Image: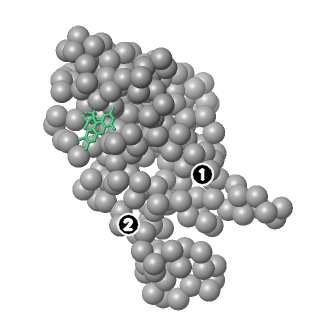
């Protein structure tokens, strides 16, 4: 399985979303899924903000683009290729101010490309091209935004991710949201991490089951590392 793995936390060793995405890949390996991982850290290789040149070039039909327009789009073309080449997407990020980190938004702006990740059908509809991709979003939140919490209505992250990738064809993404990791007592934070790990182990087992059910599935040696989650 070829996985596009993207991390987006500004934190490194102390990041829970990074630790959880690593944990998920370890669980997949433990489930004997043969992984090819294409890794992108959008806090290091941050796609640029949308510029005027990009906005014009991206909506200019491919056969009419000048050399300068092609150069403007080259990095975005490459990110789209990487995304389209994957079988599965694992995107991990913290909630920042109720939505996504700006580096991940820049990534979305780079990979939402007419003629590449979505196309126009003859009847005028847009058709997302990420239809065969499994998708897992791992989010970490300081507050508890689960149903019934006073913060429930503040979640602008989940709908934004669903809309952006739904438009690209991802119909049923899985979300594992670790919360509350900051605005709660130590026990509640530890419980939140444990819940997230259990959910991730379950998702890994499901993905593995589907992969092993296909005739060309290949088994890999388990290669597990002990991980420690970071307490905030
Ligand atoms: C700049 C910033 C903004 C944040 N905004 C929110 C927020 O709006 N809601 C929330 O629940 N947590 C918020 N948090 C807390 C983080 O989402 C939380 O600590 C998360 O676990 C961080 O994930 P990480 O360890 O992968 O960096 C914010 C943290 C930072 C640094």
On-image quarter of the C terminus? top left
The one of 58 and 63 positioned closer to us in this rendering: 58
Q: Is residue 16 left or right of residue 105?
A: left
Q: Is residue 151 visible?
A: yes
Q: How is the protein colored in the picture?
A: one colour
Q: Position of residue 164 (x, y in %)?
A: 54, 49
Q: Residue at horizontal 38%, vertical 34%? A: 139
Q: Quadrant of residue 74?
A: bottom left
Q: Secondary structure at mark 1?
A: loop
Q: Residue at horizontal 45%, vertical 87%? A: 68
Q: Is residue 46 left or right of residue 15?
A: right
Mark 1 lies on residue = 168
- Most extreme residue toward the front is 150
Q: Residue 181: which numbered mark, if any?
A: none
Q: Residue at horizontal 60%, vertical 34%? A: 172
Which tag is nearer the camera, tag 2 or tag 1?
A: 2
Q: Secondary structure at mark 2?
A: loop
Going from N to C along the chain, the mark reached first, 2 or 1, is 2
Q: Is residue 26 visible?
A: no
Q: Position of residue 61 (x, y in %)?
A: 64, 79
Mark 2 vs mark 1, CA separation in Å: 20 Å
Q: Quadrant of residue 200?
A: top left
Q: Position of residue 163 (x, y in %)?
A: 57, 45
Cβ atoms at labels 2 and 1 below 8 Å apart: no
Neighbour tally class for label 2: few under 14, some 14-19, many 20 plus, Cα within 10 Å: some
The one of 213 and 47 positioned closer to us in this rendering: 47
Q: Position of residue 8 (x, y in %)?
A: 31, 46
6 over 18 or under it: above or below: below
Mark 2 lies on residue = 49
């Amino acid at each position: 399985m070829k996985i596009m793995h993207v991390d987006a936390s500004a934190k490194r060793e102390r990041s829970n979303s990074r630790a959880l995405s690593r944990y998920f890949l370890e669980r997949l390996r433990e489930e004997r899924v043969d992984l090819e991982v294409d890794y992108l850290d959008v806090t290091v290789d941050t796609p640029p903000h949308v510029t005027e040149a990009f906005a014009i070039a991206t909506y200019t039909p491919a056969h009419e683009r000048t050399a300068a327009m092609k150069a403007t789009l080259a990095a975005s073309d490459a990110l789209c290729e990487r995304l389209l080449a994957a079988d599965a997407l694992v995107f991990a990020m913290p909630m920042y101010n109720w939505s996504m980190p700006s580096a991940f938004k820049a990534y979305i702006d780079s990979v939402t490309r007419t003629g590449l990740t979505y196309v126009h059908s003859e009847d005028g509809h847009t058709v997302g091209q990420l239809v065969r991709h499994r998708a897992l979003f791992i989010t970490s939140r300081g507050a508890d935004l689960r149903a019934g919490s006073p913060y429930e209505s503040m979640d602008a992250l989940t709908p934004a991710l669903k809309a952006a990738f739904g438009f690209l064809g991802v119909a049923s993404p899985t979300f594992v949201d670790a919360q509350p990791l900051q605005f709660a007592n130590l026990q509640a934070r530890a419980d939140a991490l444990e819940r997230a790990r259990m959910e991730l182990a379950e998702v890994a087992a499901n993905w593995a089951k589907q992969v092993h059910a296909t005739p060309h599935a290949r088994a890999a040696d388990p290669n597990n590392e002990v991980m420690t989650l970071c307490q905030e």
